[in-house]
Structure formats: C-alpha cells, structure tokens
Amino acid sequence: MKMKYIFIGLLWLYTSTVSAVELSRHVAAQVVQAQKQAEQQQLEQAIQTLRAVTAAKPQDQAYVALILANYYWQNEQSQPAIEQARYAVTSGQLKDDLAWTAKRMLADLLANDHQYQEAVTYYRQLAEAAPPKKDVSQLWLRIGQIYYQLSQWQQSLAAISRYEQFRLPDAVTPLSIKLGAQIQLTRYQAAIPTIKRLLTLEPDQRNLWLQLVNMEIKTKQFRSALASLELARLKGVALSEQNLKLLANLYAQNGIPERAARVMAGVVAQPTLEEIIQTAYYWQQAKEWDKAIENWQLAAQHDKKYYRYVVRLQLQQGNYQHALDALALLQGHDKPADIALLRTQALYKLNQFEQALSQAKKADRLHPSREAKSWIKYLTQLHVYRQNRES
C-alpha cells in the first residue's frame, strides 16, 4: 500500500500572521518581498531574499525559517526544507497555532521524505495537543499510514481505531489500512466486515471480492465464501480460470456437485487431465453416471489406468459388456489380480459362470484375498447346483 501525502500550504501565513508575530520592520519588509516573488513563481529569488535576512530577534529567525521551509518544499528541495522547519520548531520561539502549524509542516516534510519514525513522533504530539478546530481525525489517519509503512501493524490498527472514533463516513484509505493490518496480524474474522465496508465503496473491485472469499475460507465459512463468489460473478466481476475452479470446489464442498461439474465443464475448451478428473469426480458425486463415465473415458485417453473408474461405473449401471471392453483396455495398467476380480463380476452378470470362476481363481492365484475366495466358493457351489439340476 502506497501513501500519498497532501502537504499543507502555508501561503496564508504571509498575510495573516506577519503583524501577529510582531516581526522587526526590516524583516517584515523582506518577507513581503519574498511573498511577492513566490506569487510570481520566482521561488529561487524568494529563497535568496529570505536567506539574506539578518534577523537579530530569535522570533524573527524562527518565522523566517518557517517560511523558507515552505518555499524550499515548493521548489522540491526537501532536505533544506526539513532543516529550516526543524529549526523553526525546535527553537521554541513560535507560539500557539503557529507553533502547532510549524510542527505539522515538519511532520509532513519528514513523512514525505520517508523519515517515518521521526515523523510519527511529531504527529502523535500534534494529535494529543491539537488546538480547537484542527482536523485531528486526519492526524490519526496519517499516524495509521506511517505505522503501516513501518510494518507496525498493531500500532497502525490502534491509530485507525482512534480515527474511527470521529465517526466519519467510510473512506477507502483508512479501511484499506485497517484491512491490511488485520490480514498481517492474521485477524481474518475481523477482516471480513472491513472488506464488506470497502465493497460498499468499491463494489467493482475484483481483488476485494477475492479477499473476502479468501478470508471466509480461512475461517471455514465455506457457505459464505460460496455466496460471496456467486455474488461477485452475478455482479459481473471478471473471474479467472483459477477463481472458477475455486467456485466449483465451493459448490462441491457445500453439497452442490452438479453445479461444480457444470462450472468445471465450462472452465476451458481443452481441459488438462487434472481438470478432467476433477470434473468426473463432481459428476460422480452428483450421481450423473453417464457424464461421469464420459469424463473418466476422456481421462483414460491420457492415462489408461483411469479405465478402472469406467469399469466400476459400467458395472454399477449394468453395462457389463462395456465393462469387459474397458477391462481389455485396462490390461497392463492396473493390478492383474484386481482386473481378474472385475472380470469375474462382469462375466457372472453375463451368466458366463465358468469364465467367471476361472477369473476368480486367477485373481486368488495372483494375490490371495477374501474377496477372491468368496467368489470361488460361490461360483463353485453354483456350478455344482447347476450340474445337479441338469442331472
């Protein structure tokens, strides 16, 4: 997050406070001359005019330094501006509003120059001892910004909390600082309402919608995350391929696998194997068996081991010959014993009992198992029963 400082102008000082600070006559004359030069965009001349001032009174010196600081700043000479402002502040010669304004000027100059630690010290002094009618809320906002720049997240949040005590209308800058600090401190639950407040100001901000979904996922609010991502899509927020995959996953997590599958099916024209597998799982969870089989067949075109899923679904759907066809393609890509057991099931359903018994024995020979032995026992008994009936 980048901060943009709006530096306070002090040109009003030249007309409103020259007499108030009771400058020496010759100093006042040179200040007025410098003011006229500055108004004509002759900043270098104005600076030289003030540098030539020979002020005897400490109060004159402090006031001239303050005006010089302003001209140096306008002339994009930050270091001399800081030096002059620091002298004006530390001299102790400026009083009341003028002293406060000079300190504010120094704080702003330091902040603009990325001297944050010193700047924030002055800002805190200004906020704690502000004269009436000063905009203290903006000082706390500035303090929050600087602590954020210093990666001091807790202090940044505390400053924004002081800012919020003024009950101003929501604004992007303070809410953005608050959100950033909350995320850095892993206060994900607290970050959710902050993001929602930001979204009322910037409803088209894609990153805010995605941050909201991310925070809801981190806090295991999966239904809320789904609702937020659905709402973002409904509002026309552009979702990337990755975002759509997340949407599909959230549909599945919330017990809506059919929508998950439909979203995945529309993600890309040429899906990867991983995307095909995920889509197949979603269709399977939705009990859309034909679509699941179709996607497992697509996956098997990439890697024949996925024919095992085709086989199981074909068996489940009673497509026993199709299951045998798929098993022929699975040969050499799965455990031989497992293939033999699957063949046993298909052949049994097709009333090919002898072949089924042969496959069960093969399975038990390759890898002895309770399932294979159960098939052998059952098919053997069936064979004996059939023989007895025939005799």
Image (cartoon, rainbow, N blue to C red):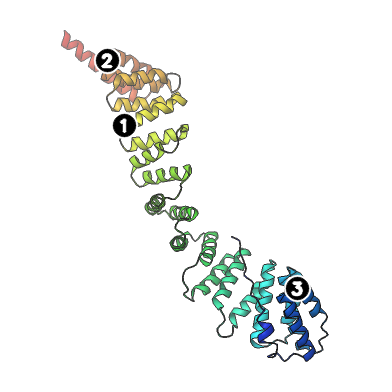
Which residue is labeled 3 in the image? 43
SS for callout 1? helix
Q: Kindly identify which numbered label has been placed on residue 289.
A: 1
Q: Does 334 sit above or below residue 46?
A: above
Q: Is residue 2 left or right of residue 250?
A: right
Closer to viewer: mark 3 or mark 1: 3
**Amino acid identity at mark 1:** Trp
Distance in Å between CA atoms under marks 3 and 1: 80 Å
38 or 237, which is in the foreground? 38
Residue at point 57%, 69% (across, down): 144
Mark 1 crowdedness (10 Å alpha carbons): few <14, some 14-19, many ≥20: some
Q: Residue furthest front?
A: 40
Q: Nearer the viewer, residue 210 or 202?
A: 202
Callout count = 3
| Residue 387 horizontal side relative to residue 46, left or right | left
Decide which of tag 3 and tag 1 comes sooner along the chain.
3
Q: Name the residue located 48 percent from the left edge and 73 percent from the top edge.
A: 168
Inspect this view and state whether residue 116 appears: no
- Residue 353, numbered label: 2
* Sooner in the amino-acid sequence: mark 3 or mark 2: 3
Q: Is residue 271 left or right of residue 325?
A: right
- Label 2, label 1: how many angstroms apart (C-alpha)? 27 Å
Instruction: Say which amino acid is labelled 3.
Output: Leu
Question: In the structure shown, which secondary structural element does the residue marked by tag 2 occupy?
Answer: helix
**Above or below, comparing residue 91 to residue 225 in the picture:** below
Q: Position of residue 338 (x, y in %)?
A: 39, 23
The N terminus lies in quadrant: bottom right
